[in-house]
Structure formats: C-alpha cells, structure tokens
Image (cartoon, rainbow, N blue to C red):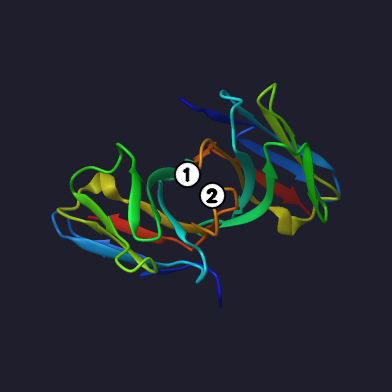
Amino acid sequence: DTGVSQDPRHKITKRGQNVTFRCDPISEHNRLYWYRQTLGQGPEFLTYFQNEAQLEKSRLLSDRFSAERPKGSFSTLEIQRTEQGDSAMYLCASSLMADNEQFFGPGTRLTVL
Amino acid sequence: KQEVTQIPAALSVPEGENLVLNCSFTDSAIYNLQWFRQDPGKGLTSLLLIQSSQREQTSGRLNASLDKSSGRSTLYIAASQPGDSATYLCAVKKGAQKLVFGQGTRLTINP
C-alpha cells in the first residue's frame, strides 16, 4: 500500500498521560500536514512540514503538543498531559508540492478518559 | 479569516437522482479547492481538485465547479447510488499550506 499510513488507529488513554502518534506519508511527498477533527466538524489545521522543517503551527497547537519530522520522512505528534478535550480524530496528510492535492491517512482516534 | 460553509448539512435522496452539494467561502483569493469524501470513522478520500485558474473538474459521475469571484463551488453527483452515502467535505487552500474545511454535508442515498 503506497498511501499515507498512521499508527495507531485507535488510542485510549487516561487524562494526564502522554501519547504519541506516527504518520508515514507517501514516499516522495515533501509536505506533511497534521489536522484534528472532532465529531460533526470538518478537520482543523494543526501544523505542517516541508521536508524536516516545521513551517507553520496553528494556535490550536498548545505547548502540550509537539510535532517532529526528523529526517523529512515520517512524522510524530506527541500530546503531553492529555485532557478530555484532546479527544478527537488526528489526521495526517501529505502532498508532493504546494499546489498538489493532499492525500489523507486513515487517522488516529484518540479517546481521553 | 477564511471561512467555508457547506449547505445543506444533511441531505437524503432516493437512488438514481442527480444532486448538487454546495460550498461557499469568504475569501476569493484561494490557491485551489478540494472535495473529499469521508465514511463514518474513516479518513478522507480526495475526490476532485480544482486549481484557482480552473472552472471545473470531472471524474466519472462527479463534476465540481468553481466560481472564485462569487466564492462558490458545487459538487454535482449524477445517478446517485447507495454507495455514495457518506459525508462530503470541501476545503480551500489559501497560500501554500493549510486547507480550511467546511463542516461537511452528510449524504444518504436511499435504495
């Protein structure tokens, strides 16, 4: 499968725990995006990378959130001290260039108890 | 701030009908517009991408149009089938980075 992959698909955690999600983009894509989607809403932008450089972060990305793309390939999104409001679907997307369509992964569903 | 609105929020039609989904955006200075499909609990599947210089794109039974000056796009689905049931999202890109999404239209095709 050469699409965008995300791991894990589901994560249940207790409030206050740290969680980390992984995204593997389509191999030749140099742009990688993270979005968050809550029930009944459209996805909201969190951050994006061009190769290994993180070029923009949304105000939604509080200091408890950190994202990395160390070698310009896969990316991780870490949430520290999770809160119930962090419960959402976290979506990753990649694109070849700025004007190309973005391809999305299956998402990671986070539930914070 | 770019805002994207999709009307209606939900739509239910009998199988075989042609239908139109609407998307409007407040800032006409967009880079491109993309339509997606999302099945319950799943990720997004890209359906059509329209660049800002284009007026429409077609893929099979789907046709998407773009009128930048009025801030509108439509997704036309011909001869609808039960398998078309899903949430349809439109998203605009301003600049070279993020997509701004509407809230989606939940479509149900009744056999």
Give the image quarter of residue B52: top right
The residue type indicated by label 2 comes to Ala
Q: Which mark is residue A98?
A: 2
- Quadrant in the rendering for residue B8: top right
- State left or right for residue B59 relative to residue A2: right
Q: Give residue A10's mark.
A: none
Q: Is residue B66 above or below residue A14?
A: above
Crowding at dot 2, Cα within 10 Å, few <14 / some 14-19 / many 20+, comes out as some
In this orientation, does residue B76 appear?
no
Residue A16 percent across, percent down from the top left: 13, 54
Q: Are marks 2 and 1 in contact (CB under 8 Å)?
A: yes
Q: Chain of mark 1?
A: B
Quarter of the image with the C terminus of chain A is bottom left
Residue B49 percent location from the top left of the image = 67, 48
Q: Is residue B14 left or right of residue A41?
A: right
Query: What residue type is disc 1 on?
Result: Gln
Q: Position of residue B16 (x, y in %)?
A: 86, 50
Disc 1 target residue: B97
Specify the subunit that label 2 lies on. Answer: A
